[in-house]
Amino acid sequence: MKLLIVDDDHNNRMTLQLLLEDIDNIDISEAKDGKEAIELCKKDHYDMIFMDIMMPNIDGISATRIIKSFDKKVMILALSALDDEESKNSMLTCGAEDYITKPIEENLFYQRVKNYMQIVELRNKKPINVNAINLFTQEVYSRSLKFSINSLQSLAELWDYYLNEPSYSIEGMEDCIRLIYAFGQLNLKNNTPFSIIAEENEDNLFLTCSQLNTISNITIQNILLKNYKNGIFIFDDNVLSFRLPKGKPLRKEEVEKLDITDYTKSILSIAHFDKTPALEYVENTPISLMAMIENLECIRDKIEVITIEFENNPTKENLLQITEYIAMYIDVLNYLMEFEHLAYALKVLNDFLIALDPKELSNSNLQKFSLLFFSLLDDIEGWRYKIFVSVEANDIHYLDSSLLSSCLQIRSLLLKEEIPENNDDDFELF
């Protein structure tokens, strides 16, 4: 854990060094004033800073405000001989976590520092919430926000909260909220109140809608693909979860290096949205998983053979062999981070094929199935090759919506009953 002592008095810095020497696994740096502290913090992240207030060049209050403007996670503990409310309030308002007066009471100091170090350690671990509602992951903070949608007024509150509050900078948020608003209107017309649970972690916001039972699953999925092509969602048992990647602020020095207009710099300093290139993703993928991904090429060849056999001899046994191979794809995707969306798409298709009776398929539908299924296999192989072999994809999610659409198209083709044209007549987007 990296600590920084900021004080213009050498003896004060030495006293703190002595107080901290019994704590294991820490790396301590020093700064003689606020200006030096700011320069050090721009070059490196410190977990905790012990900040004096009265210093030359830049005082502790100004230094705290500036450091917190570009590093919100650093713990800043003010240490001062000034025991007055004005100094204390000024430091805490600027972002300091604590205000400890000098001379330092040793036992109190140790207890507080240990507590803050515990918070830093826990902060660096991935959050886990076993009671998470979303269909993507349990790696979310323990807090959640519930919107009870029982009137148009509550829908308007949801709209304002996410689209008119400055705290949310998320790409595609407008499309997502418009869709939720429309689903909400439809539910309310059918006298079906429902709830929306918002959960999040450092990288994503998850919005989960329950009790969406007013229209069929496949109609909802088709509406999503038509109106929210880049959306990342899972829909299962009338529960719909969206994953919305958060925008990340650029550090001031990163923005200043860019050769762009002042207006663009001001936008980038608010948020930017990362795409994950294949090369970066593969470098962070365990070697054991790469072997499994390589094996997908062999699985694909086997699926092609059995699919041709199924077209000529549409037995349940041949169909189940196809589903067993698809399940192997799903297993690999479930091991990989970031591809829950594709795993979901294949699982929806596979579950449908497992329950399908081949005897009910016409020759025409069998031929169409083979054509669409081979096209899907080609897309999956192209996905595997561009991301994990040639690593030339600029964004690992470049094919997500297309693959999901293909899976749903195959399922729609084989449905015994056509999707009613008027099933979404009441679905209103604006």
Image (tube, helix red, strand yellow):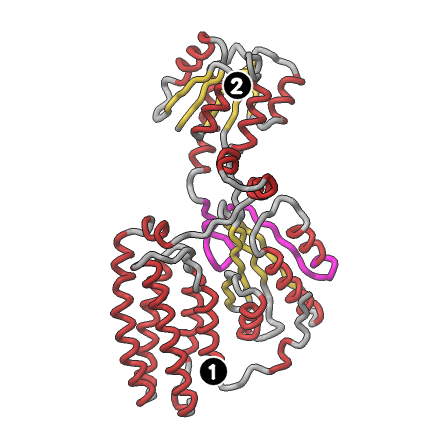
**Amino acid on which disc 1 is placed:** Leu
Q: Which mark is residue 34?
A: 2
Front position in the image: 172 or 77: 172
Q: State which quadrant residue 178 falls in.
A: bottom right
Measured as percent of width and height from the top left, residue 2 is found at: 40, 26
Binning the other alpha carbons within 10 Å of mark 1 as few (below 14), some (14 to 19) or many (20 upward) gives some
Q: Is residue 247 visible?
A: yes
Read off the residue under disc 1: 413
Please tell me in which quadrant of the rendered image residue 97 appears: top right
- Which amino acid type corresponds to the residue marked 2 in the rendered image? Gly
Q: Which residues are magenta?
A: 127-155
Q: Earlier in the sequence, mark 1 or mark 2?
A: 2
Spatial distance from mark 1 to mark 2, Cα to Cα? 68 Å
Q: Tag count in the figure?
A: 2
Q: Nearer the viewer, residue 249 or 217?
A: 249
Q: Position of residue 27 (x, y in %)?
A: 37, 24
Q: Dot 2 surroundings within 10 Å: few (below 14), some, or many (20 or more)? A: many
Which residue is at 50% across, 61% downward?
232
Q: Measuring from the top left, give residue 21's x and y in whole percent.
A: 37, 17
334 drawn magenta: no
Q: Nearer the viewer, residue 319 or 66?
A: 66
* Residue at image location 60% in from the left, 71% down from the top: 213
Which residue is located at x 34 percent, y 81 percent? 319
For the C terminus, the image quarter is: bottom right
For numbered disc 2, what is the local secondary structure? helix
Task: Please provide percent x and percent y for residue 285.
Answer: 32, 52
Q: Is residue 37 above or below residue 405?
A: above
Split into 4 quadrants, where in the image is the N terminus? top left
97 up-or-down from 143: above or below: above
